[in-house]
Amino acid sequence: ISLPLPPELVREIVHLLLSSAPSISRSFAPEDFGCSTKPSWLTLNALSLTSRTYRALVLEAWFRTLYIESPKDLEFVRCCWPEVGTKWTRHLHCVQTLTSSLSFWDLSCLLHLSSIRLDWPSSILTISFYSPLSKLRFMPFFNFSSSVDHLDLRGLMWPTPEVLRSIPQTPGLGYLKTLKIMQDVAWCGLCGGFSSVRLKDWPTGVVYEGGYGLPMDYARVLTPLEHLEKVVITVPNRDFGSTTLGHTPTTPDPDPETNSSPNLWAGECYKCMRTKYEDDAFRQKWVDRNRGVGVCRDDDGKKDTRPPKLRRVEWRFCDGF
């Protein structure tokens, strides 16, 4: 007589199937905008039909990540399938569809939500010069039922500091530990504008440990996030530029093995690096300020600040969106 497998083992089998199966969006990478990271339901369908117990375990694992393209989907979950929000979902992947209106997401039915990914297709953001988010005081989420510790924003064409300021101002995001941003251009703290990244030698990325590595305008507006530990910014490296991540500054970097950018590049545009960095005294002062050496203040008299628990900043360079 064959005995049924214990639920713990079935749960591991289900998670293995989900993690090893290809994404349903086979023609696109799961990292692309609007592409679900989940495989096809056919991956688990046969197992779900085996027994009521197995089906419950399959549904629990399947809805751990909820992919939706309309706020109406959340209303459907609330009314027709409450277990999804009250028991299963931990990760929400929502997509702003190709419309001119901004979607607002009511999260009251998701009682155990811990992470959110919001996709903004670039065509949406070309409606105006600035992202619609820049006109909002809060991110387009409301009625949080739990504290989210991971936020992933994708498709920000114009990632102004004002857009990021809306993150700590949003109730429910105050306990973020990880913030990921995929944006089309980089913010230059020297000229206060946007520019395409054009770095020589096609670096894959740069990692900073110790709390620095963000544009100072970003660090300042994110300072209220007292639990933020890690920020990852992904941006395209558009072409072979004439600038590099930096040469060895006068003051050695405190951790040269981890911080492979001795100039502490944090989004500075190629024009500013080409012109202003020719003045070695200015460059050194800017590098020291990025590192937080001394008491540094901006021209507006505000002290440079950063999230108190920030430990790691990663810049990742891709081929393009």
Image: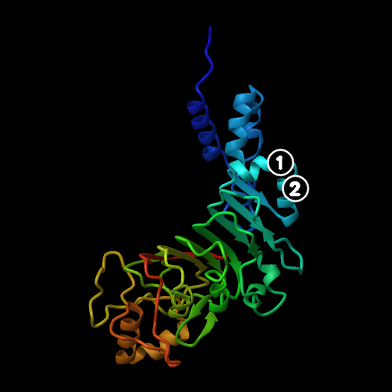
| Picture quadrant of residue 125 | bottom right
Q: Looking at the picture, how far across and down is residue 172, in whole percent?
A: 55, 61
Q: Quadrant of the C terminus?
A: bottom right
Q: Residues within 10 Å of mark 1 (few under 14, many from 20)?
A: few
Across and down, in percent, residue 238 comes to 53, 72
Residue found at x 72% / y 67%: 102
Q: For this rendering, which residue is in front, 172 or 66?
A: 172
Numbered tag placed on residue 292 in the rendering: none
The residue lying at 54 percent from left, 32 percent from top is 14
Instruction: Kindly identify the residue that appears in the image at 39 percent across and 72 percent down.
Output: 213
The colour scheme of the drawn protein is: rainbow
Q: Position of residue 275 (x, y in %)?
A: 41, 90
Q: Is residue 55 above or below residue 251?
A: above
Closest to the observer: 72 or 17? Answer: 72
Q: Quadrant of residue 194?
A: bottom right
Q: Circle 2 — which element? A: helix
How many marks the image carries: the answer is 2
| Amino acid bearing label 1 | Trp
How far is the residue under mark 2 from the one under mark 1? 7 Å
- The residue beneath circle 2 is 76
Kindly identify the residue that appears in the image at 29 percent across and 91 percent down: 281
Q: Position of residue 68 (x, y in %)?
A: 68, 52
Question: Furthest-top residue in view?
Answer: 1
Q: Is residue 275 above or below residue 317?
A: below
Disc nearer the start of the sequence (2/1): 2
Give the amino acid type for the residue marked by disc 2 in the picture.
Answer: Phe
Q: Which residue is mark 1?
A: 81
Q: Nearer the viewer, residue 201 or 247?
A: 247
Q: Judging from the image, what secondary structure is the residue with disc 1 in?
A: loop
Label 2 packing within 10 angstroms: few (<14), some (14-19), many (20+): few
- Mark 2 and 1 residues: CB-CB less than 8 Å, in contact? yes
